[in-house]
Image: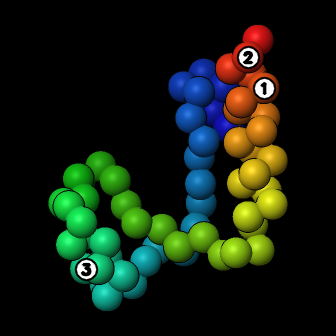
């Protein structure tokens, strides 16, 4: 969680060309964005980060 920008930050493996092509079908991917692959094993960590972000927004 980037407190200053109030954004969640994810790190993951870069998506392969096939995945990027599939994602591009729903719209263009801007040059300043990327498709990353996040393993299911971090779902709990993502939920926790979202909970932290939501609690911060309530303050």
Q: Is residue 11 above or below residue 54?
A: below
Q: Locate the C terminus and report the quarter of the image it occupies.
A: top right
Q: Height in image: 15 above or below 57?
A: below
Q: Residue at x 74, y 22 (%)?
A: 56
Q: Is residue 53 above or below residue 21?
A: above
User: Is residue 9 or residue 41 the one in the foreground?
Assistant: 41
Q: Nearer the viewer, mark 3 or mark 2?
A: 2
Q: Element at badge 3? A: helix
- The secondary element bearing badge 2 is classed as helix
Element class at badge 1: helix
Point out the frontmost of discs 1 and 3. 1
In the image, residue 14 lies at what x, y percent? 46, 74
Distance Cα–Cα, label 1 vs label 2: 5 Å
How far apart are labels 1 and 3 at the CA level? Answer: 36 Å
Crowding around mark 1 (Cα neighbors within 10 Å: few <14, some 14 to 19, many 20+) is few
Tell me which label, 1 or 3, sits earlier in the chain.
3
| Residue ID at (40%, 66%) | 35
Residue 57 image offset from top left, x and y in percent? 68, 20
The residue shown at (78%, 26%) is 55
Q: Position of residue 10 (x, y in %)?
A: 59, 54
Q: Which mark is residue 58?
A: 2
Residue extending furthest toward the top: 59
| Label 3, label 2: how far apart the Cα atoms are | 38 Å
Q: Which residue is mark 1?
A: 55
Q: Position of residue 36 (x, y in %)?
A: 48, 68
Q: Does residue 48 appear left or right of residue 16 in this picture? A: right
Task: Report the number of numbered marks.
Answer: 3
Q: Which residue is labeled 3 in the image? A: 21
Q: Contact, CB < 8 Å: mark 3 with mark 2?
A: no
**Residue 54, located in which quarter of the rendered image?**
top right
- Asked if marks 1 and 2 touch (Cβ < 8 Å), the reply is yes
């Amino acid at each position: 969680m980037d407190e200053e920008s109030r954004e969640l930050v994810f790190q993951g493996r870069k998506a392969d060309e096939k995945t990027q092509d599939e994602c591009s079908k729903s719209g263009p991917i801007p040059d300043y964005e990327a498709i990353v692959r996040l393993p299911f094993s971090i779902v709990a960590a993502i939920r926790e980060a979202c909970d932290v972000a939501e609690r911060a927004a309530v303050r």
